[in-house]
Amino acid sequence: MDDLDMYHNDRAAWIALAAPRAAARIARATEEETKRCWSCMERDYQTAVWQHLDDTQRARIRALRNAA
């Protein structure tokens, strides 16, 4: 099953697979990219990604959300 099939047919499995990758991308992203990416994520995905972020990245997202 590829990622798109998994996304449509087994969202929980897709989130478990994709969340660590998204957290790694957020760690490398600019503030604008992070803001855009985070705001487009559905809440269940945000929650899963959050678990893979370090304290610095979590603080960064909080600051970006508070600035909005």
Image (cartoon, rainbow, N blue to C red):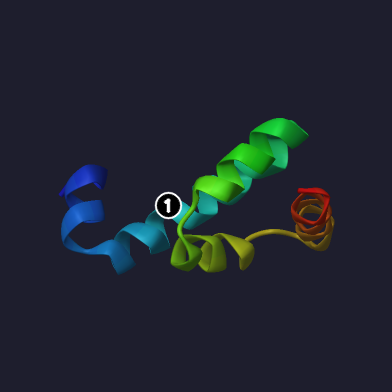
Q: Amino acid at mark 1?
A: Ala
Task: Using a 10 Å C-alpha cutoff, classify the residue at mark 1 as few (fewer than 14 neighbours), some (14 to 19) or many (20 or more).
Answer: some
The x and y percentages for residue 3 are: 26, 45
User: In the picture shown, does residue 38 fall above or below 45?
Assistant: above
At 74% from the left and 54% from the top, the residue drawn is: 65
At 28% from the left and 63% from the top, the residue drawn is: 11
At 53% from the left and 54% from the top, the residue drawn is: 20
Image position of 59 (left or right of 21): right
The x and y percentages for residue 10 are: 21, 64
The secondary element bearing badge 1 is classed as helix
User: In the picture shown, does residue 5 fall above or below 31?
Assistant: below
Q: Foreground residue, 3 or 41?
A: 41
The x and y percentages for residue 44 are: 45, 68
At 70% from the left and 35% from the top, the residue drawn is: 28
Q: Quadrant of residue 56?
A: bottom right
Q: What residue did someone put label 1 on?
A: 18
Look at the image and tell me whether residue 29 can be seen: yes
The x and y percentages for residue 63 are: 84, 53
